Image (cartoon, rainbow, N blue to C red):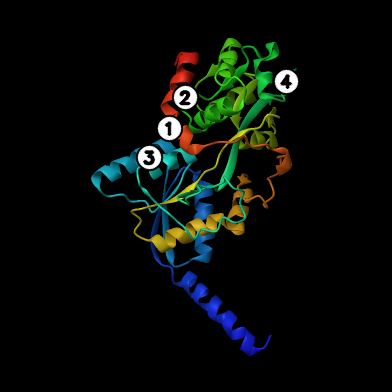
Amino acid sequence: MSMKRLLPLLAILVPAFAQAQNLSGNLVLYTSQPNTDAQQTIDAFKAKHPGVNVTFVRDGTPKILAKLSAEFEAGQPQADVLLIADSVTMEGLKKEDRLLVHEKADTSAYPTGTHDPQKFWFATKLITTGIAYNTKASFKPASWADLTRPEVKGQLVMPSPLTSGAALIHAATLTGNIEGGWDYYEALKDNEAAAGGGNGDVLKQVAGGQKLYGVIVDYMPIREKAKGAPIEFVFPKEGVSAVSEPVAILKSTKNPEAARAFVDFLLSKEGQELALKQGYIAAHPAVALPAGYPPREQIKVMGFDAARALADETKNKAAFADIFGQ
């Protein structure tokens, strides 16, 4: 390439490179990621932007929200970026005008519906909910309808939407996609399903054989199986629900440029391949799936409207509590 042709290209690349190198200051991440995943994410970002000092606070999404609420009340929000469990929570913060739009975020590689169309929050993963069963179970379920069969009676455990955000999204997704809606949960109750606690409780009971079947997020049983546990995971044929571990920038951020760069990194192919290395389904459709998962095209994700789920949250919790007496 001649110098004459190279100069215009350098004029584009050099400022972009300089901007990446010049990013500096502090960035505070509030996240519900496991500590190891959070540190890996920060380390990978800092490798590209060494001038940014990133610290993080890790807790479950409800506790992160409680901390944020107290900080908002005091007029001193500390976080710049949020990376938490679900889009419904992000929709709530968006409705409260707490999030900063990132109009220039490149989402062109993602299918429509993956991210907030107004670009206030962005999916980073697809953590689906399906069916786990203990290998000593004589009946192997292939669909959500199978959990209402006589073979499963009294042997199903699932997290409660009253205590698990993923379970609440699962209930909203399932009742919005399966014929009969909440009648399905009535059928589960009639089949003596037990509901309570979180996904970790379900894993312990199914892997330990106290219950033979469980409704649970995908990575837990898949990882336990890899360690030798007597457990299998099924992606039901009707489809699965999914939480997307979205990322968003708080409107009150003190370092918007670094915050945007952090979001851009998570949405990039490199950032999405990090999700794969951590053992999750990346939201990016061109990234492979972890070991133990079927091909991406064999996993059907049911439609989900985060804004509607937020509007229906109280109603959905009440419907579940009414059925299961909680």
Q: Position of residue 60 (x, y in %)?
A: 44, 38
- Mark 2 vs 4, N-terminal side: 4
Q: CA distance from mark 3 to mark 2?
A: 20 Å
State whether residue 218 is above or below residue 104: above
Q: Quadrant of the N terminus?
A: bottom right
Q: Quadrant of residue 130?
A: top right
Front disc: 1 or 2: 1
- For the residues labelled 4 and 3, the Cα–Cα distance comes to 40 Å
Instruction: Say left or right for 72 vs 99.
Output: left
Cα distance between the residues tagged 1 and 2:
10 Å
* Sequence-wise first label, 4 or 3: 3
Q: Position of residue 198 (x, y in %)?
A: 51, 28
Helix, strand or loop for disc 3: helix
Circle 1 is placed at which residue position?
311
Q: CA distance from mark 1 to mark 4?
A: 41 Å
How would you rate the neighbour count of disc 4 (Cα within 10 Å): few for under 14, some for 14-19, many for 20 or more? Answer: few
**Marks 1 and 3, how far apart in space?**
18 Å
Q: State if disc 4 and disc 1 touch (CB < 8 Å).
A: no
Q: Which mark is residue 65?
A: 3
Q: Which numbered mark, 4 or 3, is in the foreground of this view?
A: 3
Give the secondary structure at mark 1.
helix
Residue indicated by mark 2:
316
